[in-house]
Amino acid sequence: SQQGEEDPQALSIQEGENATMNCSYKTSINNLQWYRQNSGRGLVHLILIRSNEREKHSGRLRVTLDTSKKSSSLLITASRAADTASYFCATDAINQGGKLIFGQGTELSVKP
Amino acid sequence: DAGVIQSPRHEVTEMGQEVTLRCKPISGHDYLFWYRQTMMRGLELLIYFNNNVPIDDSGMPEDRFSAKMPNASFSTLKIQPSEPRDSAVYFCASSPLLRGPYGYTFGSGTRLTVV
């Protein structure tokens, strides 16, 4: 079964706007990761946030983690057409022996 | 490094045939993972290896699926006999650590169609 569930399933915005995607999960985690997948390609690792961290930044990406609510959010600021892709959260749950379990993803479309 | 290399990129086969998917991980990465991606079920972990040894194959759907890693630079995922419901994109990923700070590096995938 899926550990992470992303919300929304699809998001369409204009270039320059911010995009926020959310991920909820069910069990305690060691860390949570976000990946991007362009159409027809493999997944690319974006950022990892550990369970004892609350916020992390990488360029135009900002990730937050609320372990009390079992949720995370990915914010992409000043979006570009090139950000169009599917975004997945993946959890390293404490009871999963280090395996990464992926959510269903959010499909982001950034219109020029 | 050329990244994780998978072959073939596309495979179309008839039901009942044997299919072999191949993966070359990044040199020095001790962990190798096989995932399957479908619209209905998303990304599912099938099996992963550490130093060429299978550690967890609980995601392998059934006995028709088998995976091997004969050496540090090569892994195969075999389906015999194949069925239409096996149609999916199969990804191989590798990582130097199980819980490393940079996550997994994925290959471009093999799109399998079983007709």
Image: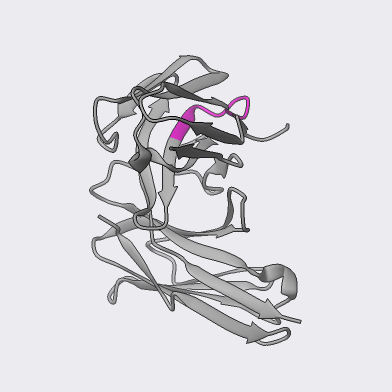
Q: Quadrant of residue A102?
A: bottom left
Q: Is residue B111 magenta?
A: no
Q: Position of residue B95 (x, y in %)?
A: 52, 36
Q: Quadrant of the N terminus of chain B?
A: top right
**Can residue B25 be found in the magenta stretch?**
yes
* As drawn, B97 above or below B88: above
- Please state the horizontal and vertical placement of residue A18, each as a whole percent of the image: 63, 85
Instruction: Please give the range of residues in magenta.
Output: B24-33
Name the residue located 23 percent from the left edge and 48 percent from the top edge: A95
Res A77 seen here: yes
Side of A6 where A28 appears, left or right: left
> Residue pushed farthest top?
B70
- Compare residues A7 and A54 and report the one nearer the observer: A7
Front residue of A23 and B21: B21
Q: Residue at x 34, y 54 (%)?
A: B41
Q: Nearer the viewer, residue A72 or B64?
A: B64
Compared with residue A20, is residue A49 higher up or lower down, i.e. above or below? above
| Rendered position, B24 above or below B83 | above
> Where does residue A39 sit, x and y in percent of width and height?
62, 58
- Would you say the magenta stretch is mainly helix, strand or loop? loop
Q: State the image coordinates of residue B30 (x, y, percent, origin top left).
A: 50, 27
Q: Is residue B21 left or right of residue B6?
A: left
Q: Residue at x 56, y 48 (%)?
A: B102
Q: Which quadrant of the figure contains the C terminus of chain B?
A: top left
Identify the image quadrant of residue B99: top left
**Tally of marks:** 0
State whether residue B70 is above or below residue A53: above
Q: How is the image coloured?
A: one colour
Q: Is residue A19 visible?
A: no
